[in-house]
Structures are given as structure tokens and as C-alpha cells.
């Protein structure tokens, strides 16, 4: 009987949610240990021993400590039973990894920080949205959706015939992006992504990991 893994982080975090989605899709129970990196006092004492860069998530399984979402997600997929979330065929797996890189390097900063944080999150905290920043982010957001849409093509999932880590990386990013009117408007131009979104957003794992 393997020990229950522990995930350190907060439910609002895109990256923590990616790991929670991987765990949920594989049917693995896990303890979420609260760590709020955005708290005024910073992360709790000792957290930097788990994650020297002070980000969330961090992960521990039977004494094996890990940080960086890509490493955690692949470890969970390979070390635990359940459906496989990495395509077995080399080219589909390369597409899956390409999409993960796109999510890390372009979609997360542009769709979440460039659009969602400015348009939705800041006004919700009575701060003023930076319209110039949104205008600068919008063409880049289109580039993100166009690239993801082209890679997906006519497949049912982003990296091919089966749901993969690529879908679980993109889904929390899209969930925030689509709360902004600009997100909804942009998605309408990419029919395959709109169909993908209606497919993934209805999954139980998405409901169970929704930030409170
Ligand atoms: N490269 C990290 C990125 C994780 C990340 O950026 N997490 C965000 C929350 S979604 C964070 O901890 N931000 C705190 C900060 O930027 O100081 C990973 O893949 O896990």
C-alpha cells in the first residue's frame, strides 16, 4: 500500500491545479497542504527547503520530494497506476511536450497574467485594469490559440486521440482566460478549441479541482 502523496500549494494556482487534475484523472488520493506564496508574510518558514524558488506546487511521495509541475506530472503518470497521460507514440508524445512548453512559456503568462489578471482579478480587488497591457497581450493571446489549434487539428484532444498531460496543462489556463470577455471572443474563432473546451470543462476532475 503506497503512502498518500502530499501536494503543497493553493487551489487558486494554475500549476497546483494541473497536478490535482493529473491526480484526479488517475484516481489518486492526495493531501493538499496549504501554502500561499502570495501571502503578505510570504511562504511559510521552511518552504524554501522544499522549493528553493518559492513557487507552488511542491510534491512529496514516500519521502521523494519534487518541484516543477512538468516533473511532478510526469512522475505521477509513470509511478502510479491508472490511465496513461503521455502518448506512447514518439510524435504524439513530442506534440504533447510541445504543448506543455507552449503552456509554460506563452499561454500561462499571456492568457492568465496578460488578460485574466488585468481584466478580471485586479478589478475584483478594486484595482484598475491596465488597458494598455491588455491591448499588448491580445495579439499574443491570438497567437497562442492559433498555435494550439493548429497542433490539435482535427483530433479530439490537444495532442491526439487520447486525453494527455497537454490537455490538463491547458485546461486551468483556459478556465481563467475564458472568464474575461476577450477570452470568450477569441475562442470563438477556433472551433476545434471551442469543442475541446466543452469536452474537457465537463470532466469531473475539472469540477472537483475548481478554485473555491
Ligand atoms: N515553473 C514552475 C512554475 C510554478 C508557478 O509559477 N507557480 C505560481 C502559482 S500558479 C507561483 O508560485 N507564483 C509565485 C511567484 O511568482 O512568486 C512549475 O512548473 O511548477
Image (spheres, rainbow, N blue to C red):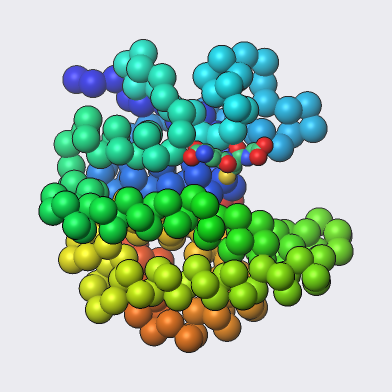
Rendered-image quadrant of the N terminus: top left
Along the viewing direction, whichever of 44 and 161 lies nearer the viewer? 161
Decide which of 3, 167 is in the foreground and name it.
167
The picture places residue 128, in percent across and down from the top left corner, at 86, 64
Q: Tell me if I can see residue 55 in this picture.
A: yes
Judged from the image, the quadrant occupied by ligand 1 is top right
Q: Nearer the viewer, residue 43 or 202?
A: 43
Identify the residue shown where x is 36% and y is 26%.
Answer: 5
Task: Give x and y (percent) for residue 199.
Answer: 33, 71
Residue at the limit of the structure toward the left, as seen here: 89
Q: Is residue 192 above or below residue 100?
A: below
Quick one: 82 or 143, which is closer to the camera? 143
Look at the image and tell me whether residue 209 can be seen.
Answer: no
Q: Residue at x 47, y 72 (%)?
A: 145
Q: Splitting the image into 4 quarters, where does residue 42 fall?
A: top right
Residue 152 location, quadrant: bottom left
Position above or below: 10 against 126: above
Question: Residue 30 vs residue 174: left or right?
Answer: left
Q: Residue at x 32, y 69 (%)?
A: 151
Q: Position of residue 208 (x, y in %)?
A: 42, 52
* Residue 144 as seen in the image, left or right of residue 164: right
Q: How many marks?
A: 0
Q: Is residue 146 left or right of residue 76?
A: right
**Vertically, is 119 above or below 36?**
below
Q: Residue at x 22, y 65 (%)?
A: 160
Is 99 above or below relative to 36? below
Provide residue 13's location: percent of width, then percent of height. 57, 45
Amino acid at each position: 500500500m503506497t503512502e498518500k502523496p502530499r501536494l503543497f500549494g493553493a487551489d487558486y494556482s494554475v500549476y497546483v491545479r494541473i497536478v490535482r487534475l493529473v491526480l484526479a484523472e488517475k484516481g489518486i488520493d492526495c493531501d493538499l497542504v496549504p501554502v500561499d506564496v502570495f501571502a503578505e508574510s510570504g511562504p511559510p518558514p521552511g518552504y524554501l527547503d522544499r522549493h528553493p524558488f518559492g513557487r507552488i506546487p511542491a510534491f512529496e511521495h514516500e519521502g521523494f520530494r519534487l518541484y516543477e509541475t512538468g516533473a511532478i506530472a510526469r512522475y505521477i503518470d509513470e509511478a502510479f497506476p491508472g490511465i496513461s497521460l503521455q502518448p506512447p507514440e514518439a510524435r504524439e508524445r513530442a506534440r504533447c511536450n510541445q504543448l506543455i512548453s507552449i503552456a509554460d512559456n506563452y499561454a500561462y503568462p499571456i492568457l492568465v497574467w496578460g488578460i485574466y489578471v488585468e481584466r478580471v482579478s485586479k478589478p475584483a480587488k478594486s484595482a484598475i485594469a491596465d488597458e494598455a497591457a491588455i491591448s499588448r497581450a491580445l495579439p499574443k493571446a491570438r497567437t497562442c490559440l492559433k498555435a494550439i489549434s493548429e497542433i490539435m487539428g482535427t483530433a479530439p484532444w490537444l495532442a491526439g486521440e487520447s486525453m494527455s498531460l497537454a490537455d490538463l496543462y491547458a485546461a486551468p489556463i483556459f478556465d481563467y482566460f475564458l472568464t474575461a470577455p476577450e477570452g470568450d471572443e477569441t475562442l470563438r474563432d477556433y472551433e476545434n478549441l471551442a469543442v475541446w473546451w466543452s469536452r474537457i470543462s465537463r470532466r469531473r476532475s475539472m469540477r472537483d479541482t475548481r478554485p473555491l
